Image (cartoon, rainbow, N blue to C red):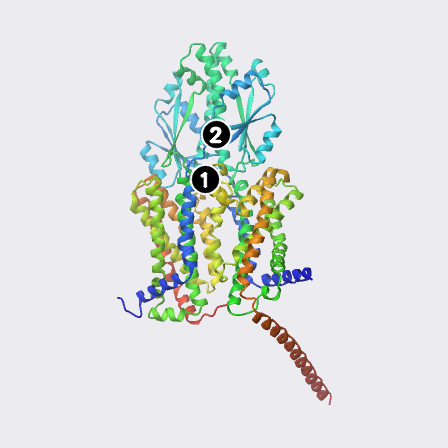
Amino acid sequence: MSGTKQGFWAVARREIVRMQSRPLYGLSMVFAPLFCFIFFTTLMKEGLPESLPAGVVDEDNTPVSRSILRNLDSYQQTEIIKQYPNFAEAREALQKNEIYGFFYIPKGTQEKASSQEQPKISIYTNSTYLIPSSLLYRDMKTMAVMASAAVGREVLLARGANMDQAMGFLQPIKMDMRPLGNPWLNYNVYLSNTMLPAVLALMILMVTCFSIHTELKDGTSREWLSLADDSILKAVSAKLFPQTMVFSLMALIYLVLLYGWLGFPLHNGFWPMFAAAELLILASQGFAVFIASAIPSLRWSLSLCTLWGVLSIPISGFSFPVMGMPEALQALSYLFPLRYYFLIYVDQALNGVPLVYSAWFYVALIAFTIMPLVDIHMLRKAAHEYTYLP
Amino acid sequence: MWVKNLFDVCGKELRNSFSDVGVLVFFFVVPLLYPLLYAYLYGREVVREVPVVVVDECRSATSREFLRKSDATPDLKIISYCSDMEEARNLIMRHKAYGVIHIPGEFDRTLSEGRQATVNLYCDMSGLLYYKAMLSGCTIVSLDMNRDIQMQRLSGLSDWEKDVMTMPIENEYVTMFNPANGFQAFLIPAVLILVLQQTLVLGVAMLAGTENERRRRGELILGHEYDNPVVVLGGKGLAYLIVYGFTATYVLCFVPWLFHMPQLWQLPTLIAFVLPFLLASIFFAMSISFFVRDRESCFLLFVFVSVPLIFMSGISWPTSNMPAFWKVLAQFFPSTHGVNGFARINTAGALLQDVRIESISLWVLTGVYFMLSLFIYERMYRSDKMPGMEFILAMRTRARHDIRVAARDIKSDIEDAAQKLRSRRKK
């Protein structure tokens, strides 16, 4: 094929030259995704935050309150770093972000305990920071229950009950949580699995749209089209082919990083997720070509692609479930390729569901890929007649 | 003299911004609509009625009570009773349910023997909020039932167990500053600050890109008309500050009000904090905008940065647990300090002295980025400031004068012609 002056490979070779001529392409196709891959996986490498700073306030300061404090053992995720003399100072520390939460033992706790009233410990957390606050709450609640149970258990054991009976009385029904697929409640698993492809898809949407429309802006579109034997389909696919290769390499890097290096759950093996990543690339390119053809203005089509790429992150539903969104947005979520990638990931990597259950999600991604067939003739017209308006 | 020039530059930059639809989109349309979209997206704060399925192998009065009460909680909704785990798993695979409540066969017997009985909860981990809903829903039910069971047992027993009943310490939970403990109040303040910084960066970069395109074509740009770089940068900065005075008021005050989010700020604190944030963002935007060669490349260069930036702010993954490298890098972005300060001013009612560190950091960043933009500006435009430039400037002034004279001539010609026409009609 070498030596041909026209056709698919000529256009592809021309595109490689164009990509090399501007650092912008290298920055957005290689540097940006790699930066985000490294950022997210190293940011949360602990998986679950450990030793979150918390405080205590003991306004009672009696043997009973001190025994409660002693029983508030530090857990792996919570570390009691400081004791504050009063409520106001603890609240201030919370506002200054020194701690994410604190225990509060009010005055009169011992009095209440000895007069057979039930004393109460309060747990305060700063919910402005949702993740540390929920984690602290879980630990602090357990600490409070344990400190309380320790007191009760000692009494029961002293009266001759055995451990089984003591626990059977103090907590007759026990919950046993079994998280499927991610038993460590690892945040890195939960975020990186969607964040990395999301950033890649965002860059694909923008780069595809940008590279097609710069042909129109720079006035090189006629040359581009004639090099592809005046076939717009050939022109576009040949132009995007080198990009597809670069993006596939990026996808391979993040797949190896997540499932090889970090060992995240991958129940059905490499191929289903590899297929999903490849189809996500093609679907994003297809969607971007669709937009670029429909809107003959670099700025507006690029704006729309950007909006789609950024919006796909919350609307794919990996942080806040789609079922909790307003109905209009639930319907809209079907128009985002990343949504389907996320559903495939849940099935194939996290839960290990048979492939047939995810078949429709793969089909949806293929549908995005062939979407430009609807309006690509408009791009052909634009490539012939377009003049750039800033 | 330089004050007049400063306002001149400011006026011209404002005119540039308002005559460019692309820039207007970044300065007004995105800040107008994007926060609304986000607030709408997370409007329900928490997930309610997460669909779960039940495998009840015990089928006793107690197990049925447990299930009925779980169904009654706002967190969970039982959509189906399955005969075995296989059937339940099938419903999870088809995304019909997100959790299984499994009550083992010996549940009731264990309870009646006075030992501890277990309820197994299987939870789909595709979203952490499902897990949270299941855990909190079932915990409430089990605490409630535990109390009933203890009461029943106590009625027939001696005082020593009553002692135990009263001894344990109760606990209560207070979530400060975000009463619904929801997603909106937690994420939206961060999104708002980030929208301000990022639209500034994109808009300023687009203006700079346009300027660079024109400069490459040999046209005159704003920087050529004024010698003093401080005046040029200061004037532009002032223009952006005026625009973002309005945008920030809308984004930071109106949007939270519209969606009934907590708004505990005090006006002096808010103004004293937002001013350095805007200044730092403006000069940050100008520093990086010099590298933008044309109008549209700002999308490719700066949009994706928003995603890591929101995590660097520590609103999601706690700052105390970040690797040191990212923690240091985060300090260089105004948004990091902006998010942390604004979240606490807005949601926790913090005063200026409570966000002193963030506020000082923002002033420092303002200084650093102003100096940086000055440095880059000097280096990039030095080549432009050759003697030839003065010639072009003089030519331009003359051309303008000529055009004005020509326009005056044409106008008087037209008037003459009109006069003649009128007098001819009279005849």
Distance, label 1 to label 2, CA atoms, is 18 Å
Q: Which residue is outermost to the left?
A: A1
User: Where does residue A283 sit, x and y in percent of width and height?
Assistant: 37, 54
Q: If the image is split into quadrants, where does the C terminus of chain B sit?
A: bottom right
Q: Is residue B62 visible?
A: yes
Label 1 marks a residue whose chain is B
Pick whichever, A279 or A68, lies toward us. Answer: A68
Which residue is painted at 58% across and 35% down in the image? A95
Which residue is painted at 41% across and 15% down in the image? A165
User: Where does residue A377 sit, x and y in percent of width and height?
Assistant: 39, 66
Question: Vertically, is B224 above or below B245?
Answer: below
Q: Is residue A363 visible?
A: no
User: Where does residue B67 sit, x and y in percent of width and height?
Assistant: 42, 28
Residue holding disc 2 = A78
Pick whichever, B416 or B313, lies toward us. Answer: B313
Residue B323 shows which numbered tag?
A: 1
Which type of secondary structure does the marked residue at label 2 adopt?
A: strand
Q: Is residue A377 left or right of residue B309?
A: left
Question: Vertically, is A111 above or below B389?
Answer: above
Amino acid at the residue labelled 1: Pro
Label 2 marks a residue whose chain is A
Q: Is residue A271 left or right of residue A45?
A: left
Amino acid at the residue labelled 2: Thr
